[in-house]
Amino acid sequence: MYNNQSALELLAENGAKVDFERKIARIPSSLVEEKLKGAPSKITLYDRDGRPALNVEKDNVYFNSGSTAINILDGETGEVRKPFTRDLEDFVRLTDALNNMHAQSTALVVSDVPETIVDRYRLYIVLKGSKKPVVTGAFTVEGSHDMKQMLTAVIGEDKLAEKPLAVFDVCPSPPLMWSYITSQNLIDCARYGIPAEIVSMPLSGATGPASLAGTIVLHTAETLSGIVLAQLSKSGTPNLRRLSSSIRHEIWNDAYGSH
């Protein structure tokens, strides 16, 4: 399901069977295979100075500092509270100093600025405080456009796609649904040449099947549906795929037990 008229039209124009009233698209396997072949197998991310920083390919493993915490544990009081700007600034400095952290992220949702600008503000704090590549994401359609402008202000319009500094997370809503905001973010990132990381997060027995096998099938279907939409928006656009933490946890338990 794509809750986005532009996405449905794009899919219909390229061979998907689309029910516009129910907002459901059935994507033929031939279209999936075609778009997978067109997606790049390697993505290079650059630092703020335009130097190669991460080669995302094959079995290369990189770490960043996580994403989108709406609460934190205060290190001084031991209390759980909402993050503030100073917390994100401290977190960015810490991540910047750790050699085993290869990329920054807009890790905390700060509570001391208006919600309408918090996605842009988080990226501003990271770009101001670190040269490392950034894993980020927009909370609104307008936010992705403004954040693109922020990136071009730092690295230049001509370098936005040529030497990408940031990756935008886009998350389908399990089971099998793309909201208007996330699907439009995916389309816009593709057209801008900004790498998008598709993060499918089904939870077994809740938003996904009870079995691990069923959850992996759902995860795969959501990921492929995102890749197809991105590649239809701009052929050859860079996409990353992340295995959700809930599935990794279940695979670990299945292999080694809960202990």
Image (cartoon, helix red, strand yellow):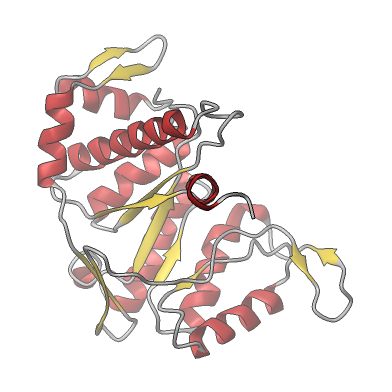
Q: Residue at x 69, y 76 (%)?
A: 87
Q: Quadrant of the N terminus?
A: top left
Q: Residue at x 43, y 65 (%)?
A: 135
Question: In this view of the protein, which residue sits in the foreground, 125 or 247?
Answer: 247
Q: Quadrant of residue 111?
A: bottom right
Q: Quadrant of residue 74?
A: bottom right
Q: Quadrant of residue 16?
A: top left
Q: Residue at x 55, y 27 (%)?
A: 210
Question: In this view of the protein, which residue sits in the foreground, 140 or 78?
Answer: 78
Residue 124, image x, y percentages: 51, 72
Q: Is residue 9 above or below residue 112?
A: above
Q: Is residue 169 above or below residue 177?
A: below
Q: Quadrant of the C terminus?
A: bottom right
Residue 143, image x, y percentages: 48, 53
Q: Residue at x 10, y 35 (%)?
A: 34
Residue 229, image x, y percentages: 26, 36
Q: In this image, 225 relative to 29: left or right? A: right
